Image: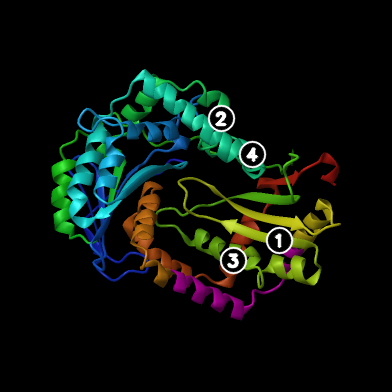
Amino acid sequence: MFRRLITAALIGSAPVGAAADAVTAYTLDNGMDVVVIEDHRAPVVVHMVWYKSGSADEPVGSSGVAHFLEHLMFKGTEKFPEGSLSEIVAANGGSDNAFTSYDYTAYYQRVAADRLPLMMEMEADRMNNIWLTDDFIATEREVILEERAQRTDNNPGSLAREQMMASQYLNHRYGVPVIGWRHEMEQLDLADALNFYTNYYAPNNAILVVAGDVQPAEVKALAEQYYGVLPREDALPPRFRPEEPQQTAERRLTYVDPRVSQPYLVRSYLAPERDPGDQSDAAALTYLAELLGGSSFTSVLSVKLQFESQIAVFTSAGYSGGSLDDTTFALSVAPAEGVTLSEAEAAMDAALQEFMARPIDADRMEALRTQIKAGQIYGKDDVEGLANQYGALLAQSLTVQDIQDWPEILASVTPEQIKEVAARVLNRDQSVTEWVVADREDAK
């Protein structure tokens, strides 16, 4: 689904769980968005650059190139040659890393606050001047293939999820793994990496987040000095993704792998994400996940399946609204010994039907409100967590105001809203149910 890009303005207001006037946001003349989160309790700063491009923006047939380029970005530039970027961060007492998701790629350093100019100098240089060779390509391609082998191919749960996502998304690139399909990763070359770099690594496709012991005016001056001089990319591709067609049929699959130690089932439903100016459904789904499977002791599935009937040894529900396009709402159940997956699934469906038929307990709702509010308060102690939160959500099309409105939207959710969104989302026609077993004989 096409999403509008961030329109940034000078804003001074509060992040989730932080004091008023702790966040300042502005846009440089070349289109780069900047967010400053003040926290003066320690002389430390987190410096992050988020590119509004991830694996879902990759060309068809080049899956994994966003993550591949993330690795290659550490090879260096003419000014900061191979390996020196991380070495310089470490020599200055800091740490650095990067990560790729469907919707963004992010690079960060955590250092003493007085080292911020150096971090900006290095990050701005590799935004515009990355230096790659065929030797780098060959070496790093083997690294990402080995990473896939260790994290995905050697993990039956990861392989099962990969198959499930491919079944959930009929048309959207969220059905392709972030790390890529192995047969396409093996073909990635220098041209693939440079094309992605040229298309997307530009200041007008990036968000700078600086959090810690800093002053907004000083950060702005530094950002203009190091990032503001970089040329904008006027040919930046529009952020258009293939939309999912209307899903009208339930999908089911069985994943068999002898390494599976505990059979389990997962059901995933297509669900709305947090949209700019429209986060009410996402807020209601946040509560729904907690009510159905957020607690091992008080949630609907745990009470019904683990304690009352002892049909399951584990239950859960999960939802994350942080996504540029439609996300998922998932339920999972691991049956007790002697219980078949069919019996466990029937019990799960019965528990869902009973939940929909009965009013939501008022005391439970208030307990969840308190729990969520407490999480927001504790969150202000984690400046790196706040930097990650702002960067990810801004890269997924939300605005600073949307992020700051979220606690109030959560606090205003009603039981009626939860039931209404549950009736829409828990629709078997837009679901995938997967059984994960060690032997096909267990799939019954």
SS for callout 2: loop
- In whole angstroms, how far apart are the C-alphas of marks 2 and 1? 31 Å
Q: Give the foreground label among 3 and 2.
A: 2
Picture coordinates of residue 132 (x, y %)? 32, 24
Q: Amino acid at mark 2?
A: Trp
Q: 142 or 376: which is nearer to us? A: 142
Q: Residues within 10 Å of mark 4 (few under 14, many from 20)?
A: some
| Residue 169 magenta-highlighted | no
- In whole angstroms, how far apart are the C-alphas of marks 1 and 4? 20 Å
Q: Amino acid at mark 1?
A: Phe
Residue 328 seen by the camera: yes
- In whole angstroms, how far apart are the C-alphas of marks 2 and 4? 11 Å
Q: Which mark is residue 159?
A: 4
SS for callout 1: strand
Q: Amino acid at mark 3?
A: Glu
The boundaries of the magenta stretch are 351-375
Identify which residue is drawn at 19% across, 35% down.
Answer: 230
Q: Residues within 10 Å of mark 3 (few under 14, many from 20)?
A: some
Q: Which residue is mark 2?
A: 181
Q: Mark 2 or 1 closer to N-term?
A: 2
Identify which residue is drawn at 35% across, 63% down.
Answer: 404
Picture coordinates of residue 394 (x, y %)? 36, 51
